Amino acid sequence: MPLLDVQNLFIRIGRGESAIDVVRDISFSVGSGEIVGILGESGCGKSLTAFSVLGLLPQGLSAAGQIKFDGRDLLSLGEQDLCALRGNRIGMIFQEPATALNPVQTVGDQIAEPLRLHTGMGKREARAETLHLLERIHLPNPRAALDVYPHQMSGGQRQRVVIAMALACRPSLLIADEPTTALDTTVQRQILDLLLDLVDETKSGLLLITHDIGVMAEMTERVLVMYGGVIVESGPTEKIITDPAHPYTRALLRAVPQRALGYDTWLESIPGTVPAPSERLRGCLFRSRCSLAGPECEVQPDLIPRGPDRVAACWRLPQVDGSVPA
Amino acid sequence: MTTIAEPASEARRRIRLFRYPGLTVGGAIVATVVGATLLSLVWTPYSPLTMNMRQRFQGPSLAHIFGTDQFGRDVLSLLMVGAQNSLAVGIVAVAIGLAVGTALGLFAAARRGWVDEAVMRVCDFLFAFPAVLSAVMLAAALGPGTGNAMLAIGFYNIPIFARIARGAAKGVWVREFIYAARTAGKGAVRISLEHVLPNILNIIVVQATISFATAILAEAALSYLGLGTQPPAPSWGRMLHESQVFLSRAPYLSIFPGLIIVLTVLGLNLLGDGMRDALDPRHAQGR
Protein backbone atom coordinates (compact mmCIF):
# COMPACT_ATOMS: atom_id res chain seq x y z
CA MET A 1 0.00 0.00 0.00
CA PRO A 2 1.45 3.39 -0.92
CA LEU A 3 2.08 5.93 1.82
CA LEU A 4 -0.05 8.56 0.17
CA ASP A 5 -2.79 7.57 -2.21
CA VAL A 6 -4.84 10.28 -3.87
CA GLN A 7 -7.82 9.14 -5.91
CA ASN A 8 -10.12 11.30 -8.02
CA LEU A 9 -9.33 14.49 -6.17
CA PHE A 10 -11.39 17.55 -7.05
CA ILE A 11 -10.75 20.97 -5.58
CA ARG A 12 -13.61 23.39 -5.88
CA ILE A 13 -14.03 27.13 -5.41
CA GLY A 14 -17.43 28.20 -4.16
CA ARG A 15 -20.56 26.14 -3.75
CA GLY A 16 -23.49 24.98 -5.78
CA GLU A 17 -24.12 26.15 -9.33
CA SER A 18 -21.36 28.75 -9.52
CA ALA A 19 -18.69 26.38 -8.16
CA ILE A 20 -15.59 26.05 -10.30
CA ASP A 21 -13.27 23.07 -10.22
CA VAL A 22 -9.70 24.31 -10.05
CA VAL A 23 -8.30 20.80 -9.75
CA ARG A 24 -10.15 18.07 -11.60
CA ASP A 25 -10.07 14.37 -11.05
CA ILE A 26 -6.42 13.80 -10.28
CA SER A 27 -5.03 10.55 -8.91
CA PHE A 28 -1.51 9.69 -7.86
CA SER A 29 0.41 7.96 -5.11
CA VAL A 30 3.66 8.38 -3.23
CA GLY A 31 5.43 5.44 -1.63
CA SER A 32 7.92 5.40 1.27
CA GLY A 33 11.32 6.60 0.17
CA GLU A 34 9.91 7.64 -3.18
CA ILE A 35 10.22 11.09 -4.73
CA VAL A 36 7.26 12.08 -6.85
CA GLY A 37 7.12 15.38 -8.66
CA ILE A 38 4.25 17.57 -9.74
CA LEU A 39 5.28 19.72 -12.66
CA GLY A 40 3.37 22.60 -14.11
CA GLU A 41 3.12 26.31 -14.73
CA SER A 42 1.92 28.78 -12.10
CA GLY A 43 -1.77 28.48 -11.42
CA CYS A 44 -2.21 24.93 -12.62
CA GLY A 45 -3.23 23.66 -9.19
CA LYS A 46 0.03 22.12 -7.95
CA SER A 47 0.15 23.94 -4.65
CA LEU A 48 -3.57 23.50 -4.02
CA THR A 49 -3.12 19.78 -4.45
CA ALA A 50 -0.39 19.84 -1.81
CA PHE A 51 -2.39 21.94 0.61
CA SER A 52 -5.42 19.69 0.23
CA VAL A 53 -3.30 16.80 1.52
CA LEU A 54 -2.68 18.80 4.70
CA GLY A 55 -6.32 19.85 4.95
CA LEU A 56 -5.23 23.48 4.69
CA LEU A 57 -7.02 24.75 1.62
CA PRO A 58 -7.67 28.50 1.69
CA GLN A 59 -11.13 29.61 2.80
CA GLY A 60 -13.81 29.06 0.20
CA LEU A 61 -12.13 26.06 -1.37
CA SER A 62 -13.17 22.50 -0.75
CA ALA A 63 -11.76 19.14 -1.70
CA ALA A 64 -13.65 16.03 -2.75
CA GLY A 65 -12.44 12.56 -3.60
CA GLN A 66 -10.11 10.45 -1.56
CA ILE A 67 -6.75 11.24 0.02
CA LYS A 68 -5.48 8.19 1.87
CA PHE A 69 -2.44 8.59 4.06
CA ASP A 70 -1.25 5.46 5.83
CA GLY A 71 -4.66 3.95 5.20
CA ARG A 72 -6.65 6.84 6.72
CA ASP A 73 -8.83 9.06 4.61
CA LEU A 74 -7.60 12.58 5.33
CA LEU A 75 -10.65 14.28 3.84
CA SER A 76 -12.87 12.70 6.47
CA LEU A 77 -10.65 13.62 9.42
CA GLY A 78 -11.58 16.42 11.82
CA GLU A 79 -9.41 19.45 12.48
CA GLN A 80 -8.00 17.97 15.66
CA ASP A 81 -6.87 14.75 14.00
CA LEU A 82 -5.38 16.76 11.15
CA CYS A 83 -3.46 18.94 13.60
CA ALA A 84 -2.00 15.79 15.10
CA LEU A 85 -0.81 14.69 11.66
CA ARG A 86 0.51 18.00 10.38
CA GLY A 87 4.11 18.59 11.29
CA ASN A 88 4.18 15.19 12.92
CA ARG A 89 3.59 12.60 10.19
CA ILE A 90 3.46 15.03 7.27
CA GLY A 91 6.02 17.81 6.99
CA MET A 92 5.78 20.79 4.70
CA ILE A 93 8.60 22.80 3.14
CA PHE A 94 7.72 26.20 1.76
CA GLN A 95 8.84 28.15 -1.24
CA GLU A 96 9.84 31.38 0.40
CA PRO A 97 12.05 30.87 3.45
CA ALA A 98 12.06 34.60 4.12
CA THR A 99 8.37 34.58 4.96
CA ALA A 100 7.89 31.02 6.21
CA LEU A 101 9.66 31.81 9.48
CA ASN A 102 8.27 33.93 12.28
CA PRO A 103 10.44 37.08 12.35
CA VAL A 104 10.15 37.59 16.10
CA GLN A 105 10.98 34.08 17.28
CA THR A 106 14.43 32.56 17.44
CA VAL A 107 15.28 29.81 15.00
CA GLY A 108 15.84 27.33 17.82
CA ASP A 109 12.42 27.97 19.32
CA GLN A 110 10.70 27.60 15.96
CA ILE A 111 12.25 24.23 15.23
CA ALA A 112 11.60 23.04 18.76
CA GLU A 113 7.91 23.90 18.47
CA PRO A 114 6.66 20.89 16.51
CA LEU A 115 8.82 18.68 18.73
CA ARG A 116 7.23 19.99 21.90
CA LEU A 117 3.80 19.93 20.31
CA HIS A 118 3.83 16.39 19.00
CA THR A 119 6.39 14.42 20.95
CA GLY A 120 5.78 15.81 24.42
CA MET A 121 9.45 16.69 24.81
CA GLY A 122 10.44 19.11 27.55
CA LYS A 123 12.15 22.38 26.82
CA ARG A 124 15.67 21.11 27.34
CA GLU A 125 15.11 17.89 25.47
CA ALA A 126 13.61 19.71 22.50
CA ARG A 127 16.54 22.09 22.44
CA ALA A 128 19.01 19.24 22.34
CA GLU A 129 17.06 17.59 19.55
CA THR A 130 16.91 20.90 17.68
CA LEU A 131 20.67 21.20 17.87
CA HIS A 132 20.93 17.69 16.51
CA LEU A 133 18.60 18.62 13.65
CA LEU A 134 20.61 21.72 12.83
CA GLU A 135 23.70 19.56 12.63
CA ARG A 136 21.91 17.15 10.34
CA ILE A 137 20.96 19.89 7.90
CA HIS A 138 24.60 21.05 7.92
CA LEU A 139 24.01 24.53 9.23
CA PRO A 140 27.33 26.20 10.00
CA ASN A 141 27.78 26.88 13.70
CA PRO A 142 24.53 25.18 14.78
CA ARG A 143 24.86 26.05 18.46
CA ALA A 144 24.90 29.78 17.72
CA ALA A 145 22.05 29.37 15.23
CA LEU A 146 19.70 28.26 18.01
CA ASP A 147 19.47 31.77 19.36
CA VAL A 148 19.44 33.93 16.24
CA TYR A 149 16.42 35.40 14.50
CA PRO A 150 15.56 34.50 10.90
CA HIS A 151 16.58 37.91 9.49
CA GLN A 152 20.12 37.31 10.64
CA MET A 153 20.49 34.34 8.32
CA SER A 154 20.99 34.04 4.59
CA GLY A 155 18.27 32.68 2.33
CA GLY A 156 19.93 29.28 2.05
CA GLN A 157 20.36 29.01 5.80
CA ARG A 158 16.74 29.93 6.32
CA GLN A 159 15.60 27.28 3.88
CA ARG A 160 17.67 24.75 5.82
CA VAL A 161 15.86 25.87 8.95
CA VAL A 162 12.49 25.45 7.21
CA ILE A 163 13.57 21.94 6.23
CA ALA A 164 14.69 21.22 9.78
CA MET A 165 11.25 22.31 11.03
CA ALA A 166 9.54 20.02 8.57
CA LEU A 167 11.81 17.13 9.53
CA ALA A 168 11.70 17.65 13.28
CA CYS A 169 9.22 14.91 14.10
CA ARG A 170 10.57 12.49 11.47
CA PRO A 171 7.50 12.64 9.23
CA SER A 172 6.89 9.77 6.87
CA LEU A 173 5.78 12.18 4.13
CA LEU A 174 7.40 15.45 3.13
CA ILE A 175 5.72 17.94 0.85
CA ALA A 176 8.04 20.50 -0.71
CA ASP A 177 6.36 23.37 -2.53
CA GLU A 178 8.95 24.89 -4.87
CA PRO A 179 11.66 24.51 -2.21
CA THR A 180 14.42 26.10 -4.28
CA THR A 181 12.59 28.66 -6.39
CA ALA A 182 13.51 31.57 -4.15
CA LEU A 183 17.19 30.62 -3.83
CA ASP A 184 20.40 31.30 -5.77
CA THR A 185 21.43 28.61 -8.21
CA THR A 186 24.43 27.52 -6.16
CA VAL A 187 22.37 27.32 -3.00
CA GLN A 188 19.64 25.43 -4.89
CA ARG A 189 22.12 22.66 -5.55
CA GLN A 190 22.97 22.35 -1.85
CA ILE A 191 19.35 22.31 -0.77
CA LEU A 192 18.43 19.67 -3.34
CA ASP A 193 21.36 17.50 -2.29
CA LEU A 194 20.27 17.87 1.31
CA LEU A 195 16.73 16.80 0.45
CA LEU A 196 18.00 13.79 -1.48
CA ASP A 197 20.22 12.74 1.41
CA LEU A 198 17.42 13.14 3.90
CA VAL A 199 14.94 11.11 1.88
CA ASP A 200 17.56 8.45 1.44
CA GLU A 201 18.29 8.42 5.14
CA THR A 202 14.78 8.61 6.58
CA LYS A 203 12.94 6.66 3.89
CA SER A 204 10.16 9.22 3.93
CA GLY A 205 8.16 9.88 0.80
CA LEU A 206 8.66 13.25 -0.87
CA LEU A 207 6.09 15.06 -2.94
CA LEU A 208 8.05 17.72 -4.80
CA ILE A 209 6.17 20.55 -6.46
CA THR A 210 8.07 22.55 -9.01
CA HIS A 211 7.93 24.31 -12.32
CA ASP A 212 11.63 23.73 -12.84
CA ILE A 213 12.25 20.84 -15.20
CA GLY A 214 15.92 20.67 -14.21
CA VAL A 215 15.00 20.12 -10.58
CA MET A 216 12.37 17.63 -11.65
CA ALA A 217 14.79 15.65 -13.80
CA GLU A 218 17.39 15.37 -11.07
CA MET A 219 15.23 14.69 -8.08
CA THR A 220 12.18 12.68 -8.97
CA GLU A 221 11.50 9.10 -9.94
CA ARG A 222 8.00 9.72 -11.17
CA VAL A 223 6.35 12.89 -12.33
CA LEU A 224 2.84 14.20 -12.87
CA VAL A 225 2.52 16.96 -15.41
CA MET A 226 -0.41 19.21 -14.58
CA TYR A 227 -2.11 21.71 -16.82
CA GLY A 228 -5.11 23.82 -15.87
CA GLY A 229 -5.98 21.65 -12.89
CA VAL A 230 -5.78 18.26 -14.60
CA ILE A 231 -3.02 15.73 -15.04
CA VAL A 232 -2.05 15.65 -18.71
CA GLU A 233 0.75 13.14 -18.43
CA SER A 234 2.44 11.02 -15.83
CA GLY A 235 5.11 8.35 -15.71
CA PRO A 236 8.74 7.67 -14.83
CA THR A 237 10.70 10.91 -14.97
CA GLU A 238 13.42 9.55 -17.19
CA LYS A 239 10.95 8.42 -19.85
CA ILE A 240 9.06 11.66 -19.77
CA ILE A 241 12.20 13.75 -20.14
CA THR A 242 13.61 11.70 -22.98
CA ASP A 243 10.37 10.93 -24.76
CA PRO A 244 7.58 13.28 -23.76
CA ALA A 245 4.19 12.26 -25.09
CA HIS A 246 1.74 15.04 -24.41
CA PRO A 247 2.14 18.18 -26.55
CA TYR A 248 2.19 20.30 -23.40
CA THR A 249 5.06 18.31 -21.89
CA ARG A 250 6.93 18.54 -25.16
CA ALA A 251 6.40 22.28 -25.30
CA LEU A 252 7.60 22.62 -21.71
CA LEU A 253 10.75 20.69 -22.49
CA ARG A 254 11.46 22.79 -25.53
CA ALA A 255 11.18 25.86 -23.32
CA VAL A 256 14.20 24.73 -21.25
CA PRO A 257 17.66 26.03 -22.14
CA GLN A 258 19.28 22.97 -23.68
CA ARG A 259 22.78 24.15 -24.30
CA ALA A 260 23.92 21.96 -21.47
CA LEU A 261 22.54 19.00 -23.36
CA GLY A 262 24.51 19.84 -26.48
CA TYR A 263 21.73 21.29 -28.55
CA ASP A 264 22.09 24.81 -29.73
CA THR A 265 18.59 25.75 -30.63
CA TRP A 266 16.44 28.76 -29.97
CA LEU A 267 14.62 28.69 -26.71
CA GLU A 268 10.95 28.27 -27.43
CA SER A 269 8.03 29.66 -25.53
CA ILE A 270 4.51 28.35 -25.41
CA PRO A 271 2.14 30.86 -26.98
CA GLY A 272 -0.73 32.05 -24.84
CA THR A 273 -1.38 31.52 -21.13
CA VAL A 274 -3.05 28.94 -18.96
CA PRO A 275 -6.79 29.58 -19.20
CA ALA A 276 -8.27 30.95 -15.97
CA PRO A 277 -10.46 28.46 -14.10
CA SER A 278 -13.56 30.53 -14.89
CA GLU A 279 -13.00 30.49 -18.64
CA ARG A 280 -12.15 26.86 -18.94
CA LEU A 281 -13.31 25.29 -22.12
CA ARG A 282 -14.87 21.98 -22.68
CA GLY A 283 -12.53 19.31 -23.88
CA CYS A 284 -8.76 19.45 -23.80
CA LEU A 285 -7.65 22.58 -21.94
CA PHE A 286 -4.41 22.84 -23.83
CA ARG A 287 -6.01 22.92 -27.26
CA SER A 288 -5.99 26.71 -27.50
CA ARG A 289 -2.19 26.64 -27.33
CA CYS A 290 -1.55 23.30 -29.01
CA SER A 291 -0.04 22.87 -32.45
CA LEU A 292 -1.63 19.45 -32.87
CA ALA A 293 -5.15 20.50 -31.91
CA GLY A 294 -7.95 19.09 -34.03
CA PRO A 295 -11.71 18.70 -33.87
CA GLU A 296 -11.60 15.67 -31.56
CA CYS A 297 -9.92 17.83 -28.92
CA GLU A 298 -13.30 19.41 -28.09
CA VAL A 299 -13.90 16.30 -26.02
CA GLN A 300 -11.90 15.93 -22.82
CA PRO A 301 -9.32 13.22 -23.46
CA ASP A 302 -8.87 10.42 -20.94
CA LEU A 303 -5.51 9.40 -19.58
CA ILE A 304 -4.49 6.77 -22.12
CA PRO A 305 -1.71 4.29 -21.28
CA ARG A 306 1.44 4.95 -23.26
CA GLY A 307 3.82 2.21 -22.33
CA PRO A 308 4.66 0.70 -18.96
CA ASP A 309 3.60 2.94 -16.11
CA ARG A 310 2.88 5.86 -18.39
CA VAL A 311 -0.29 7.73 -19.27
CA ALA A 312 -1.04 10.85 -21.28
CA ALA A 313 -4.28 12.67 -21.97
CA CYS A 314 -4.21 13.44 -25.68
CA TRP A 315 -6.24 12.24 -28.66
CA ARG A 316 -3.70 13.24 -31.26
CA LEU A 317 -0.80 11.04 -30.29
CA PRO A 318 0.27 8.14 -32.48
CA GLN A 319 -0.90 5.01 -30.76
CA VAL A 320 1.62 2.87 -28.98
CA ASP A 321 1.54 -0.77 -30.02
CA GLY A 322 0.26 -3.24 -27.48
CA SER A 323 -0.63 -0.62 -24.89
CA VAL A 324 -3.84 0.71 -26.34
CA PRO A 325 -6.83 -0.31 -24.27
CA ALA A 326 -9.46 -2.40 -26.02
CA MET B 1 27.29 30.62 3.07
CA THR B 2 28.17 33.45 5.34
CA THR B 3 28.52 33.21 9.06
CA ILE B 4 25.58 33.95 11.27
CA ALA B 5 25.23 37.55 12.37
CA GLU B 6 25.49 38.82 15.91
CA PRO B 7 22.62 38.33 18.37
CA ALA B 8 19.56 40.54 18.04
CA SER B 9 20.02 42.51 21.23
CA GLU B 10 23.07 44.10 19.66
CA ALA B 11 21.03 45.41 16.74
CA ARG B 12 18.32 46.67 19.05
CA ARG B 13 20.80 48.62 21.10
CA ARG B 14 21.83 50.45 17.99
CA ILE B 15 18.51 52.24 17.73
CA ARG B 16 19.90 55.60 18.61
CA LEU B 17 17.69 57.60 20.89
CA PHE B 18 18.55 60.89 19.31
CA ARG B 19 17.27 59.84 15.93
CA TYR B 20 13.85 60.20 17.47
CA PRO B 21 13.69 63.50 19.38
CA GLY B 22 10.03 62.89 20.29
CA LEU B 23 11.00 59.64 21.93
CA THR B 24 13.74 61.32 23.93
CA VAL B 25 11.74 64.38 25.03
CA GLY B 26 8.59 62.35 25.72
CA GLY B 27 10.59 59.75 27.59
CA ALA B 28 12.24 62.46 29.71
CA ILE B 29 8.90 64.06 30.62
CA VAL B 30 7.30 60.74 31.48
CA ALA B 31 10.35 59.67 33.47
CA THR B 32 10.21 62.92 35.46
CA VAL B 33 6.51 62.50 36.24
CA VAL B 34 6.96 58.86 37.20
CA GLY B 35 10.04 59.74 39.27
CA ALA B 36 8.21 62.50 41.15
CA THR B 37 5.30 60.15 41.75
CA LEU B 38 7.54 57.45 43.15
CA LEU B 39 9.28 60.05 45.28
CA SER B 40 5.93 61.18 46.69
CA LEU B 41 5.42 57.72 48.12
CA VAL B 42 8.24 58.38 50.59
CA TRP B 43 8.72 62.13 50.62
CA THR B 44 6.91 65.35 49.73
CA PRO B 45 8.07 68.89 50.51
CA TYR B 46 5.09 69.37 52.86
CA SER B 47 2.41 67.04 54.11
CA PRO B 48 -0.23 67.21 51.35
CA LEU B 49 -3.19 66.87 53.71
CA THR B 50 -2.19 69.17 56.54
CA MET B 51 -4.05 72.45 56.37
CA ASN B 52 -2.40 75.66 57.42
CA MET B 53 -4.83 78.55 57.39
CA ARG B 54 -2.11 81.14 57.99
CA GLN B 55 -0.44 80.11 54.78
CA ARG B 56 -3.52 80.33 52.50
CA PHE B 57 -3.17 81.57 48.93
CA GLN B 58 0.56 82.04 48.99
CA GLY B 59 1.81 82.74 45.47
CA PRO B 60 4.75 80.80 44.06
CA SER B 61 7.84 81.38 46.20
CA LEU B 62 10.99 79.60 47.20
CA ALA B 63 9.22 77.98 50.14
CA HIS B 64 6.24 76.91 48.01
CA ILE B 65 7.34 76.66 44.40
CA PHE B 66 3.79 76.28 43.09
CA GLY B 67 2.20 78.27 45.93
CA THR B 68 -0.44 77.12 48.42
CA ASP B 69 -4.18 76.58 48.07
CA GLN B 70 -7.23 77.85 49.93
CA PHE B 71 -6.42 75.62 52.90
CA GLY B 72 -2.75 76.53 52.94
CA ARG B 73 -1.66 73.16 51.51
CA ASP B 74 1.47 73.04 49.37
CA VAL B 75 0.41 72.74 45.70
CA LEU B 76 3.58 70.91 44.62
CA SER B 77 3.04 68.26 47.31
CA LEU B 78 -0.59 67.92 46.28
CA LEU B 79 0.36 67.52 42.64
CA MET B 80 2.96 64.89 43.48
CA VAL B 81 0.53 62.84 45.52
CA GLY B 82 -2.24 63.45 43.00
CA ALA B 83 0.02 61.93 40.35
CA GLN B 84 -0.16 58.60 42.19
CA ASN B 85 -3.84 58.63 41.60
CA SER B 86 -3.60 59.66 37.94
CA LEU B 87 -0.95 57.07 37.15
CA ALA B 88 -2.78 54.31 39.03
CA VAL B 89 -5.99 55.03 37.13
CA GLY B 90 -4.03 55.16 33.86
CA ILE B 91 -2.25 51.86 34.51
CA VAL B 92 -5.32 49.94 35.60
CA ALA B 93 -7.57 51.41 32.89
CA VAL B 94 -5.05 50.64 30.15
CA ALA B 95 -4.46 47.17 31.59
CA ILE B 96 -8.19 46.41 31.44
CA GLY B 97 -8.56 47.77 27.92
CA LEU B 98 -5.38 46.09 26.70
CA ALA B 99 -6.06 42.68 28.18
CA VAL B 100 -9.72 42.38 27.21
CA GLY B 101 -9.45 44.31 23.95
CA THR B 102 -6.39 42.48 22.64
CA ALA B 103 -7.91 39.13 23.52
CA LEU B 104 -11.11 40.06 21.69
CA GLY B 105 -9.19 41.32 18.68
CA LEU B 106 -7.05 38.18 18.48
CA PHE B 107 -10.15 36.05 18.83
CA ALA B 108 -12.00 37.91 16.08
CA ALA B 109 -9.03 37.70 13.72
CA ALA B 110 -8.56 33.99 14.36
CA ARG B 111 -12.20 33.03 13.97
CA ARG B 112 -12.97 35.32 11.02
CA GLY B 113 -16.42 35.18 9.46
CA TRP B 114 -19.47 36.11 11.49
CA VAL B 115 -17.65 36.02 14.85
CA ASP B 116 -15.28 38.68 13.56
CA GLU B 117 -18.20 40.73 12.24
CA ALA B 118 -20.11 40.45 15.50
CA VAL B 119 -17.16 41.49 17.68
CA MET B 120 -16.37 44.44 15.44
CA ARG B 121 -19.97 45.66 15.25
CA VAL B 122 -20.16 45.66 19.05
CA CYS B 123 -16.93 47.68 19.06
CA ASP B 124 -18.43 50.12 16.55
CA PHE B 125 -21.38 50.56 18.87
CA LEU B 126 -19.09 51.30 21.82
CA PHE B 127 -17.04 53.65 19.67
CA ALA B 128 -20.06 55.81 19.05
CA PHE B 129 -19.80 57.16 22.60
CA PRO B 130 -17.15 59.82 23.24
CA ALA B 131 -14.56 58.84 25.83
CA VAL B 132 -15.64 61.11 28.62
CA LEU B 133 -19.35 60.59 27.97
CA SER B 134 -19.11 56.84 28.31
CA ALA B 135 -16.91 57.23 31.37
CA VAL B 136 -19.43 59.64 32.88
CA MET B 137 -22.29 57.23 32.15
CA LEU B 138 -20.50 54.32 33.73
CA ALA B 139 -19.24 56.31 36.68
CA ALA B 140 -22.76 57.64 37.21
CA ALA B 141 -24.19 54.13 37.06
CA LEU B 142 -21.56 52.55 39.31
CA GLY B 143 -21.15 55.52 41.62
CA PRO B 144 -18.22 57.91 41.94
CA GLY B 145 -14.82 56.75 43.12
CA THR B 146 -11.33 55.91 41.93
CA GLY B 147 -12.07 52.24 41.36
CA ASN B 148 -15.11 52.94 39.24
CA ALA B 149 -13.23 55.57 37.27
CA MET B 150 -10.62 52.91 36.48
CA LEU B 151 -13.35 50.52 35.34
CA ALA B 152 -15.15 53.13 33.28
CA ILE B 153 -12.04 54.32 31.47
CA GLY B 154 -10.79 50.76 31.05
CA PHE B 155 -14.10 49.78 29.51
CA TYR B 156 -13.85 52.64 27.06
CA ASN B 157 -10.42 51.37 26.03
CA ILE B 158 -11.60 47.84 25.21
CA PRO B 159 -12.93 48.53 21.68
CA ILE B 160 -9.87 50.64 20.85
CA PHE B 161 -7.51 47.78 21.61
CA ALA B 162 -9.86 45.23 20.09
CA ARG B 163 -9.96 47.06 16.78
CA ILE B 164 -6.24 47.69 16.63
CA ALA B 165 -5.32 44.14 17.64
CA ARG B 166 -7.82 42.65 15.21
CA GLY B 167 -6.59 44.71 12.27
CA ALA B 168 -2.94 43.97 12.95
CA ALA B 169 -3.64 40.30 13.67
CA LYS B 170 -5.49 39.89 10.39
CA GLY B 171 -2.41 41.21 8.65
CA VAL B 172 -0.27 38.62 10.42
CA TRP B 173 -2.67 35.73 9.79
CA VAL B 174 -2.19 35.92 6.03
CA ARG B 175 1.58 35.69 6.30
CA GLU B 176 3.27 32.50 5.28
CA PHE B 177 4.81 31.63 8.63
CA ILE B 178 1.31 31.30 10.03
CA TYR B 179 0.64 28.80 7.28
CA ALA B 180 3.90 27.14 8.24
CA ALA B 181 2.77 27.01 11.86
CA ARG B 182 -0.48 25.42 10.74
CA THR B 183 1.36 22.82 8.72
CA ALA B 184 3.31 22.13 11.90
CA GLY B 185 0.01 21.12 13.48
CA LYS B 186 -0.74 24.12 15.67
CA GLY B 187 -4.25 25.10 16.64
CA ALA B 188 -5.68 28.62 16.36
CA VAL B 189 -5.24 29.45 20.05
CA ARG B 190 -1.55 28.61 20.11
CA ILE B 191 -0.94 30.36 16.81
CA SER B 192 -2.68 33.48 18.13
CA LEU B 193 -0.64 33.53 21.33
CA GLU B 194 2.72 32.37 20.07
CA HIS B 195 2.89 33.73 16.55
CA VAL B 196 0.33 36.50 16.10
CA LEU B 197 0.60 38.29 19.45
CA PRO B 198 4.40 38.74 19.42
CA ASN B 199 4.14 40.19 15.94
CA ILE B 200 1.56 42.82 16.88
CA LEU B 201 3.03 43.65 20.27
CA ASN B 202 4.78 46.80 19.07
CA ILE B 203 1.50 48.26 17.84
CA ILE B 204 -0.20 47.33 21.10
CA VAL B 205 2.54 48.93 23.20
CA VAL B 206 2.32 52.16 21.23
CA GLN B 207 -1.45 52.21 21.62
CA ALA B 208 -1.06 51.53 25.34
CA THR B 209 1.09 54.64 25.70
CA ILE B 210 -1.40 56.80 23.85
CA SER B 211 -4.34 55.29 25.72
CA PHE B 212 -2.48 55.99 28.94
CA ALA B 213 -2.49 59.67 28.05
CA THR B 214 -6.21 59.70 27.28
CA ALA B 215 -6.88 57.76 30.48
CA ILE B 216 -5.11 60.44 32.53
CA LEU B 217 -7.14 63.11 30.77
CA ALA B 218 -10.34 61.17 31.30
CA GLU B 219 -9.56 60.67 34.98
CA ALA B 220 -8.91 64.40 35.36
CA ALA B 221 -12.20 65.12 33.62
CA LEU B 222 -14.11 62.66 35.81
CA SER B 223 -12.56 64.03 38.99
CA TYR B 224 -13.27 67.56 37.80
CA LEU B 225 -16.91 66.54 37.47
CA GLY B 226 -16.81 64.96 40.92
CA LEU B 227 -17.20 61.42 39.60
CA GLY B 228 -13.60 60.32 40.06
CA THR B 229 -11.35 60.44 43.07
CA GLN B 230 -13.16 61.62 46.17
CA PRO B 231 -11.84 64.10 48.75
CA PRO B 232 -9.66 64.31 50.67
CA ALA B 233 -7.38 62.23 48.40
CA PRO B 234 -5.63 64.72 46.11
CA SER B 235 -6.31 64.47 42.40
CA TRP B 236 -5.31 66.64 39.45
CA GLY B 237 -8.82 66.96 38.12
CA ARG B 238 -10.30 67.91 41.46
CA MET B 239 -7.58 70.47 42.09
CA LEU B 240 -8.70 72.15 38.86
CA HIS B 241 -12.30 71.96 39.93
CA GLU B 242 -11.66 73.47 43.37
CA SER B 243 -9.41 76.19 42.06
CA GLN B 244 -11.81 77.61 39.51
CA VAL B 245 -13.69 79.46 42.26
CA PHE B 246 -10.48 81.35 42.98
CA LEU B 247 -9.53 81.88 39.37
CA SER B 248 -9.27 85.67 39.65
CA ARG B 249 -7.74 85.67 43.12
CA ALA B 250 -5.16 82.91 42.66
CA PRO B 251 -4.84 81.92 38.98
CA TYR B 252 -1.72 79.85 39.67
CA LEU B 253 -3.96 77.36 41.50
CA SER B 254 -5.50 76.45 38.14
CA ILE B 255 -2.44 76.99 35.99
CA PHE B 256 -0.08 74.53 37.67
CA PRO B 257 -2.37 71.48 37.78
CA GLY B 258 -3.45 72.25 34.22
CA LEU B 259 0.14 72.58 33.10
CA ILE B 260 1.09 69.29 34.73
CA ILE B 261 -1.81 67.49 33.03
CA VAL B 262 -0.90 69.00 29.66
CA LEU B 263 2.78 68.16 30.07
CA THR B 264 2.13 64.57 31.14
CA VAL B 265 -0.26 63.95 28.27
CA LEU B 266 2.11 65.62 25.83
CA GLY B 267 5.01 63.53 27.14
CA LEU B 268 3.06 60.29 26.78
CA ASN B 269 1.92 61.18 23.27
CA LEU B 270 5.45 62.09 22.20
CA LEU B 271 6.69 58.85 23.71
CA GLY B 272 4.03 56.85 21.88
CA ASP B 273 4.68 58.51 18.53
CA GLY B 274 8.41 58.18 19.00
CA MET B 275 8.11 54.48 19.81
CA ARG B 276 5.91 53.96 16.78
CA ASP B 277 8.55 55.52 14.56
CA ALA B 278 11.43 53.71 16.24
CA LEU B 279 9.70 50.33 16.05
CA ASP B 280 8.51 50.73 12.47
CA PRO B 281 11.00 49.02 10.20
CA ARG B 282 10.08 51.28 7.29
CA HIS B 283 11.06 54.33 9.32
CA ALA B 284 14.20 52.71 10.64
CA GLN B 285 15.52 51.63 7.26
CA GLY B 286 14.85 54.95 5.59
CA ARG B 287 17.39 56.69 7.73
Image (tube, rainbow, N blue to C red):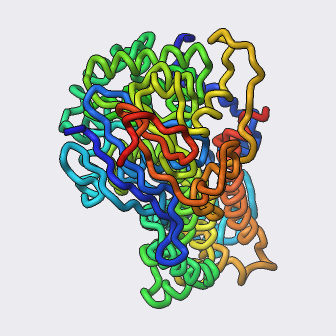
The residue drawn where x is 62% and y is 62% is A281
Figure check: A69 above or below A8: above
Q: Is residue A63 left or right of residue A21?
A: left
Question: A215 or B132: nearer the eye?
Answer: A215
Quadrant of res A130: top left
Question: A160 or B21: nearer the eye?
Answer: A160
Question: A309 or B40: nearer the eye?
Answer: A309
Q: Is residue B260 left or right of residue A149?
A: right
Q: Is residue A61 visible?
A: yes
Tell me where residue A224 appears, x and y as whole percent: 45, 38
The residue drawn where x is 28% and y is 28% is A204
Tell me where residue A27 appears, x and y as whole percent: 37, 48
Question: A96 or B249: nearer the eye?
Answer: A96
Q: Is residue A77 left or right of residue A270?
A: left
Q: Is residue A105 visible?
A: no
Quadrant of res A175: top left
Tell me where residue A133 appears, x and y as whole percent: 32, 20
Figure check: A200 above or below A100: above
The residue drawn where x is 47% and y is 67% is B112
